Image: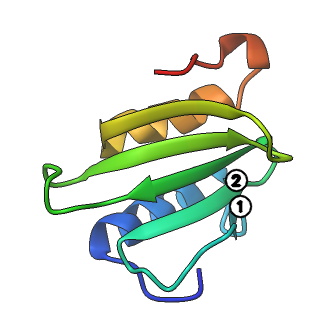
Amino acid sequence: MRSKKVEEIEELLQEIRGIYGSHSVESYGDCDDPTSAGFRVREIPATFAVIVGDRLPARHFNVQIESSPPGDYLYHDPAMSYWEFLELVGRFSGPRSTWPTMK
């Protein structure tokens, strides 16, 4: 990531690195906004975007997932918890037949 992110996003990215490997997170379309992050997780054919905001509860994210290569929006949840997001990434790491559908 190019710029320092808010603590909630930094913790989430660190947890993903702990699960999938220290070099597993690749920045994608990231801007200098500390309240959002776009990234890929190696070996998962999807792009993840998480956004925190003052209208969301603590440790919750607005989540958007797009196919990689880009073209299809796969999933959206306007208020997903930290643990739900980690579980969701796990589902996307499995076969496409187990991926969740657009919410």
Residue 64 in the image: above or below residue 16: above
Give the residue displayed 53% in from the left and 54% down from the top: 49
Identified by mark 1, the residue type is Ser
Q: Residue furthest front?
A: 71
Q: Where is residue 72 shown, x and y percent of the image?
A: 74, 34
Q: Where is residue 28 shown, x and y percent of the image?
A: 69, 67
Q: How many numbered marks does the figure carry?
A: 2
Near-viewer residue (27 or 23): 27
Report how far apart the C-alphas of labels 1 and 2 lie in the structure: 5 Å
Q: Is residue 82 left or right of residue 13?
A: left
Give the residue displayed 71% in from the left and 61% down from the top: 24
Residue tagged 2: 41
> Is the Cβ of the residue at disc 1 closer than 8 Å to that at disc 2?
yes
Q: Where is residue 30 shown, x and y percent of the image?
A: 60, 74
Labelled disc at residue 3: none
Q: Where is residue 68 shown, x and y percent of the image?
A: 81, 45
Secondary structure beneath label 2: strand
Residue 19 in the image: above or below residue 102: below
Identified by mark 2, the residue type is Val
Near-viewer residue (55 or 19): 55
Q: Residue furthest right?
A: 69
Residue tagged 1: 24
